[in-house]
């Protein structure tokens, strides 16, 4: 697959995911009301989201994209941040 095809497929998947999420928001009942969707439909929607995310990950892997993984605040970090302090210049200000 070329990058153009992957890009087109990614746009299609993104549009499907966003549209499906909008439909879910529109039909979600207020608290205390029954859902207009059957249990089978809810499971089908969950399966669609799963398949979309699996394919999006496959495409990202093919392109070599590294998806940033979210982390919890209390999660142990594997990297250490090192601060650097710029040394002061011996020359007075205004001189080159």
Image: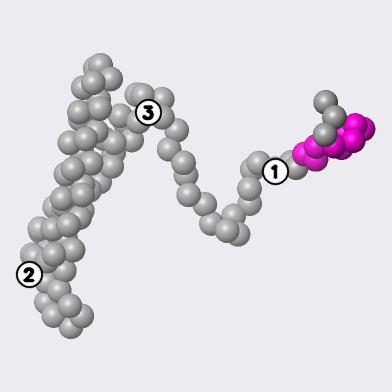
Left/right placement of residue 54 relative to residue 94 reads left
Count neighbours of disc 3 (C-alpha within 10 A) and say few if under 14, some if 14 to 19, many if 20 or more: few
Magenta range is: 84-93
Q: Position of residue 27 (x, y in %)?
A: 12, 66
Residue furthest bottom as drawn: 32
Is residue 2 shown above or below 53? above
Please name the residue that numbered disc 1 is placed on: 81
Q: Residue furthest top?
A: 2
From the top left corner, tell me how far across and down residue 89 is, in percent: 87, 33
Considering only order in the chain, which callout, 1 or 3, is on the residue closer to the N terminus? 3
**79 horizontally vs 14: left or right:** right
**What colour scheme has been applied to the protein in the rendered image?**
one colour
User: Disc 3 vs disc 1: which is toward the camera?
Assistant: 1
Work out whether residue 3 or residue 87 is closer to the camera in this orientation and state it: 87
Alpha-carbon span between mark 2 and mark 1: 50 Å
The mark nearer the N terminus, 2 or 3, is 2
Q: Position of residue 2 (x, y in %)?
A: 25, 16
**Residue denoted by label 2:** 36
Prevailing secondary structure class for the magenta stretch in the rendered image = loop
């Amino acid at each position: 697959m070329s990058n153009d095809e992957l890009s087109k497929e990614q746009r299609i998947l993104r549009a499907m995911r966003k549209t499906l999420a909008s439909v879910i928001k529109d039909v979600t009942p207020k608290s205390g009301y029954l859902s207009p969707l059957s249990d089978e439909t809810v499971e089908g929607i969950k399966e669609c989201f799963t398949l979309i995310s699996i394919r999006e990950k496959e495409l990202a892997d093919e392109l070599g994209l590294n998806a940033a993984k979210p982390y919890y605040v209390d999660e142990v970090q594997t990297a250490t941040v090192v601060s650097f302090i710029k040394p002061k210049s011996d020359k007075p200000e205004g001189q080159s």
